[in-house]
Amino acid sequence: MNPVVGIAAFAAVSVATAVIGFYGLRISRTTGDFYVASRTVRPWWNASAIGGEYLSAASFLGVAGLILLSGTDALWFPVGYTAGYLMLLLFVAAPLRRSGAYTIPDFTEARLDSRVVRSVTSVVVVMVGWLYIVPQLHGAALAIRITTGLPAWVGQVAVVAVVCVTVVAGGMRSITFVQAFQYWLKLTALALPILFIVFTLAGSGTPAVAAASVNPTAVAPAGLYQNISLLVALLFGTLGLPHVLVRFYTNPDGQSARRTTLIVLGLLSVFYLFPTAYGLIGRMFAPVLAQSGQADALVLLLPGQLIGGAAGDLLSALVVAGAFAAFLSTTSGLVVSLAGVISQDLFGGSVRGFRWAAVISAVVPLGIASMTGSLALAGSVGMVFAFTASTICPVLLLGIWWRGLTDAGAIAGMATGAVLCGGAMVAGAVLGADGPPSWLAQPAAWTVPAAFAVTVLVSRATRNRVPRTITRLMTRLHTPERPLVTER
Amino acid sequence: MPDSPLFIAAAIAVIAMAIAVVVAVGLKVLRSFRELGTDAERATYKTLHAASRAGQHLRTGLNPAGAAKASRQLRSLLGCDALAITDTTGVLAWDGAGEELKPLLMELAAGVLDGGHTAVIPAGEVQELAQGKGAVATRPEVERAAVIAPIRTGTRVVGVVAAFAPAAGAGLVRATGEVADWVATQVELAELDASRTLLMEAEVRALRAQISPHFIYNSLNAIASFINTDPVRARELVVEFADFTRYSFRRHGDFTTLAEELRCIDRYLLLERARFGDRVQVSLRIAPEVLSTVIPFLSLQPLVENAVRHGLEAKEGPGHISITANDSGAFAEVTIEDDGVGMDPEQLRAVLAGHADGDHVGLRNVDARLRQVYGDEHGLVIETAPGEGTLITMRVPKSQPRHDA
């Protein structure tokens, strides 16, 4: 592939992100159109922004790669990523929006009336964020290596640098519009090339190399346990992702938070059609990629392989741009929300503190990413979801829906989840070479219930620690608020 | 996760660090045990430690949760079999043996609660009373005497401390009396805390901005001037004025959302423009992300009013006010800038500190409320100089789960 294509695409996306971030808000209004100026973000915009932030390297590159490798079994990933929003819609979106807490640590502190719980939650949130940024950087490394032939670390450093500069320079001021733009960019970047490919293949009548049902590698398909465990991780993991929750505060009230979530479900469903199509066509026309261990790069390589020429180069550029949009949007969303948590707990919430915190929250994962080798992208993001599902999710769900949760229970639950799931991850990595047993590779099915059980049991045992403000808080979480009036 | 040698090395390093930390902490604890000092010093420490621990629990006043934790500490202090704390109506906490006597305690304490003098009830009497009431002792061979001392705050008796021991010696009686007095001090401190909180709330309420009488007067005059020339506009302005007063006179809540406050500002500016015509120009740049941020009620309107009143009124020709609201990490940042006559920084400082009565009382009021609610680092930041206009910046945390808009 032409190296210029990759670099040009990356540069274009970075500049577009920065420009929208800096100037998206620079439109001044006069009092004549006061109500245009003070209008809240419409659910459509906000849903696009959530989609833009949520669709990470795993969705953009990983899903297609997994479908190429393991066929329909891999469909559980997009199903889980999307259905997680159903859980969010049903159980979390509206009450959390009403709570007035802006981050998960804020929520747990207010709900349990305890500074210690706040600190523990902050640590967990920061860990989750870092773990989630790492696969994005692996994706960036892969994309740069495949498209330009430069060393892998260039891609990681470039993404971190762009994110740091925009966040520190205040370029995330109109973050909703940046992220909404990223969603539509990603969708176009996937949809256009695949439609092109489909029509070209259909037009030229190229015969398929292999049937779609043929497994291109010797890797055994996942069993029932693994699929269930994966689904548990994805369904419950989405609830606790730090960057997703923050977006709901852009909604003026709980009701529009629900409507936004509904639209997100639609947007994600549409989006995941395309990685699936890539995977399927990859199986039929380019199974070689799976055998050469380049499955994750399928989306990047397919247009060039199947179309070629100038048209192929252009389509490749579009896909590369979309991929970098995915890395940038998810990473910057995570960095902003992590920086919020870190600056508040470590630097007392000053502006300078926020900038330092942003740098810290981007550079630490860069270190981790450069030390570790990349694994299947969708798989490693799945691990992050498992970790979130066994640490933050029990506290969040029980905190919203159960009056009996206590600070001791919350801490015990988070610690249990972190130790069990983290332990499984490390053990899996140590055993790595011969493939860890499936209960270690996909720990969510037992770590999530264990974390829930410990949280409930310890809360029961420390019943007298239920905060006295509980009734007031629960009323606030579950009764409709006065609507935010912005129209005359 | 990956299985590279580096990753394993990192894992080993983390484990090694954890072991090092545990060993270091262990050594420190061991050393601190060795340096505990003489028996007398240790006894003093133990007493003071128990007292201070119990004190923390009592700082929320006489309630069951605090009393339960404090009674454990106090029992170890007195070295008695059982210790109970009551208020005037019931037993709050019972720590130690002989729980079957619990229902009798209020009866035993009745005299103390009335008279306010320490009572010593011999073992036999306690037992007799227990049998009379049909309370079955789990271990009837253990007889306990009771020392009941009143908790007095001011002239009132708010509860008792009761200690149970096989024999009520003079030592125990004296010590129980002292413990009761000490509990009383803690309860008084708790009451002090509570009244301080009330005072702070009252102060915030008193500071709650009122719209200025000048503004009402001027607006009504401006409207009056339109009644003959442009009745339709006059009618519209009266409606705006009604809406504005409705908002600013509302009774409920000390907080509002940025969106509502901006609406109020819009109405205010409409009325001001009826007076000033095109002399007041306003531009807005509001990030939609912060519209639902909770801010103190009427905290922006006085700032805009200040800009109009002191920035533009005294100036010749048109003046420009720009209002922006930005998302800045965990905070929302609101700025109000005018290109009017500005202020003398020294004089402004004196006004804000409350040393001088000036024209900028509205600013002082908002500044004081912001500091009261969010802490000193969240006061107004004002950049100004005579003739140079004024820029006022306000930074409030977006996350305020304790404040209802």
Image (cartoon, coloured by chain):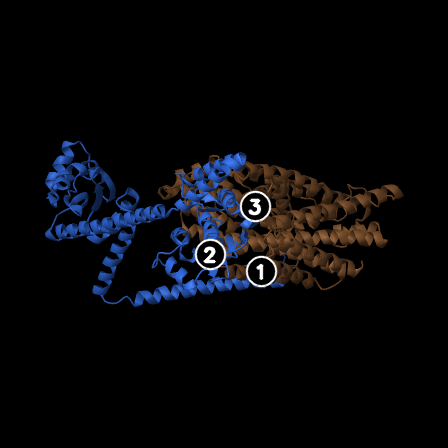
Helix, strand or loop at label 2? It is helix
| Disc with the residue nearer the chain's start (1 vs 2) | 1
- Would residue B191 be seen by someone viewing this image from the given angle? yes
Give the Cα separation between the discs numbered 2 and 3: 38 Å
Which x, y percent locates residue B170?
10, 52
As drawn, the label of residue A345 is 2
Foreground disc of the pair 3, 1: 3
Amino acid at pointer 2? Asp
Tell me whether marks 1 and 2 sit on the same chain.
yes
Foreground disc of the pair 2, 3: 3
Amino acid at pointer 1? Val
Tag 3, which chain? A
Which x, y percent locates residue B107?
16, 36
Reading the image, the residue beneath label 1 is: A168
Amino acid at pointer 3? Thr
- Name the residue nearer the viewer: B295 or A290: B295
The reply, left or right, for residue B82 in relation to residue B281 is left
Q: To which quarter of the image does residue B249 belong?
A: top left
Which chain is assigned brown?
A
Q: Are marks 2 and 3 in contact (CB under 8 Å)?
A: no
